[in-house]
Image (cartoon, coloured by chain):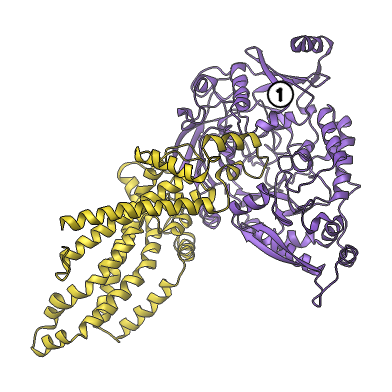
Chain colours: A yellow, B purple
Amino acid sequence: MKRFLLKRILSGVLIIFISLLICFVLIHAAPGNPVTILAGHDNPSPEMIESLTEKYGLDKPLPMQFVNYLGTLLKGDLGYSIVSDKPVVTLIAEKIFPTLLLALTGVILAVVIGTMLGIYAARKKGSRFDVAVNSISYVFDSTPGFWLGLMMILLFASTFKLFPTAGMVDLRAGYTGSAKVLDILHHLFLPLLTVTLIQIPRFFRIARSSVIQIMSEDFITTFRAAGMKESQIFRDYVFKNAILPTVTLFGISLAYVLGGIVIVEIVFAWPGMGRLLMDAIMKRDYPLLMGIYLTLSVSISVTMLLVDIVYAAIDPRIRYE
Amino acid sequence: MKKMKKFMSLLLVSVFVLTISAGCGKGGGTNEDAGGGESSGEPKQGGTIVVGIPQDPQSFNPNAKTDDVLFDIGQNIFSRLIKLNNKQELVPDLAEDYEVSPDGLEITFHLRKGVKWHDGEDCTSKDVKWTFDQIINEDGQIKSNLSSVESIEAPDDYTVIFHLTQNDSNLLSYLGWYGCLIMPAHLYEGTDWLDNPANKKPIGTGPFKFVEYKSGVSVTLERNDDYFGQVPYLDKIIYSVIPDSNTALQAFNNGELDILGINPPLSEMGNLQANENYVVGLQQWPARYQVAFNVKEGKFADPKLRQAVALGLDKDAVIEKALKGAGQRCDTAMVSLYEWALNTEDVYPERDVKKARELIEEAGYTADKDGMYFSVELEAWNEIPYSDIGTVVKDNLKEIGIDAKLNITEMAAWTDKVWVNHDYEIAVLGGFQGPDAGGLSLRFASDGSMNIYEYANEELDENLAEGRMKVTHEDRKEHYIRAQQILIEDLPMVPLSEMMLVTPYYSYVKGHPLSDEAIDKAGYKEYTYIWLDK
């Protein structure tokens, strides 16, 4: 196990390095330049463009820029945003909490609800419930997040006036203490509902199909023939086997939690990482983009490692030697 | 030698006093919304307004880097020497008045006395001098606008003198525009202005004080009771960051915003105007949507083809279909706001599809079986209304036999291709044409910073330079009239519509910068005169 961990950590570091390199090449290959975008289309100043290009080292050859970047990175410094001159670490740190609150809660709710619905539907395969939930799951799976979000706003905020339209807090009221927590939850509801609804279908379908598959295996038929109680068969044999693909999918979803709900964050004006990423891409803010990609690749590597460890714990067939 | 020269000019010059209001043209052309201005009584003290902004401000340093979001907010935190009101006229701000010497080589500003920074320090000529020196030395965003400034002198606490290398009639408007908000020297002097604590907690002299900024959420300002001008009625302004314009519109409809603040989706214009709880402020901005040509390379280097396009464009269709009515037809070569220098005789031709096709044939093209002479890529970026304008223009071009393929790209890619490298044949864009008739130089002079047309005409350059060097409107006028005539002949671009800024707000918001009661005195998006009638 120790050797396995060491190997996985080393390969993780290598993967992070390679993904950084790829990101660096790709974002610099994309047309556009942060300084000319910054200067805008109303009276750009050639002097400002020249002086900022020099200040941020954008006039140097690309390989040199990459080496410079790695150099500061190794000192533990993610650098400064070209657009706002704030440390990249600060910009990212400010956004992590709102994103985790929305995305992590969303994934957890989706995995619990989706899996429960999936198992129930599988056990009642062919029932009206199964058919209904199955078809609804396709609808939500194919619904674009931004559209669903806007519909939620139109329905629950504009028509029924039950929830606020956008943002994370009521700016006019400016609550503090426990009222603030309630206020954030109130604002969280619609984006969370949207994020959860779009993610439920995958968890639903994977749970449903793996339960159905395990239920039709020979050993289950044998248990049934031997007269074992249906609930015991399910609890001890079906569930444990059927949950494995869900764990994989949950791991993957967790890994993308930080950057995966860009569109929903934008629609609901939720101040998270996704929006930061989108802005950084639009403005070609290279240091900020690299910082976000680094955070994402580290979090993906770490969650993948955790998923592997969890596997070993729940599946006796898997042992790392 | 230089000193001698200055002394001589000082001696020779009999000072020619311009009161500020007389120093600028009649605004005109600004569309105020009917009913927007009438207040139903005495202004009420107090209250908070929430205003939408599409993004976070990048920083709170108003002069170092271009930032459209901070431009809106900064109007309320900082002051300028003089400012452009919402009719694009210059009005006093920190400077009570100014004088221009007859040879135009000296502009003397007389500052108000007793102005305090938000931290209690006195605001003096030292701050003004420092601000402009800093912009020039550190390549601030408007450094190119200050190219004629030789030095800035602060002989006493309340006088600032700009010494120019030549008369520059564009300069005053530039000073009233953006990127030159006066910053506190006592906090910035001797530091890196990109990395100063005040960039996070700005100190200004404006009508509102900065309270707090929450990343991705909001910026809060409160009333400055020590403001040198009329002290605002409002207690607070809260700017709420809402990136998606559809969401912003819903937030506005649901009462979460008092002023939309963000350009609404134009398809919603009708609904907004029909709602009697709203006022839809329409403001002509000295900018226009246009079709630009590369006049040096590619097919449109041939003037006949440019004339054909000018004849083929259906401006009314662009305004109706792409801008949903939020436009104003433009046939003159300059934005119509600067009436004193507007050439209304030499204008773009009326639409004539038949004549356009004849011109293309004269240029040596023959139509294929579909009636198309040639094909071309029409560049536009992927934002409303540019993509919609592109679609209408593409259809117009098809009618005159140009098979245009609309190439819609992301803004960054468009900027690189069209704006920086001029690697295009024909493109759709918008853009500022001011802040004065002199703004023509930026777009059309052969060394203009926004001359993306690769356009160069010596006579035009001379006229623009003369217009800039002469002092009075009468003397400048003839040069701009001639410049517009040349532009109509050469056609480096064809304007489609004047740009109208659409600003919906609730009708209980009185004293909005676009309303009758504030339009003359408030700067762009300056909320000093707002009070809530509810």
Tell which of B213 and B131 is nearer to you. Answer: B131
Q: Position of residue B75 (x, y in %)?
A: 60, 34
- Indicate the quadrant containing the N terminus of chain A: top left, top right, bottom left or bottom right: bottom left
Where on the picture, by quarter, is residue B206?
top right
- Let me know if residue A107 appears in the view: yes
Q: Secondary structure at mark 1?
A: strand
Asked whether A310 or B127 is in front, the reply is A310
Residue that carries the numbered disc 1 in the rendered image: B149
Q: Left or right? Give the position of B141 relative to B46.
A: right
Residue A46 lies, in percent from the top left, at 65, 37
**Which residue is pictured at 45% across the width and 28% down the height?**
B197
Q: Residue furthest bottom?
A: A225
Residue sitting at 31 percent across and 58 percent down?
A: A105
Disc 1 marks a residue whose amino acid type is Val
Q: Is residue B271 visible?
A: no
Q: Is residue A249 left or right of residue A284?
A: left
Q: Quadrant of the C terminus of chain A?
A: bottom left
| Placement of A280 over or under B340, stated as above or below | below
**Chain letter for mark 1:** B
- Residue B205: percent from the left, percent from the top? 56, 25
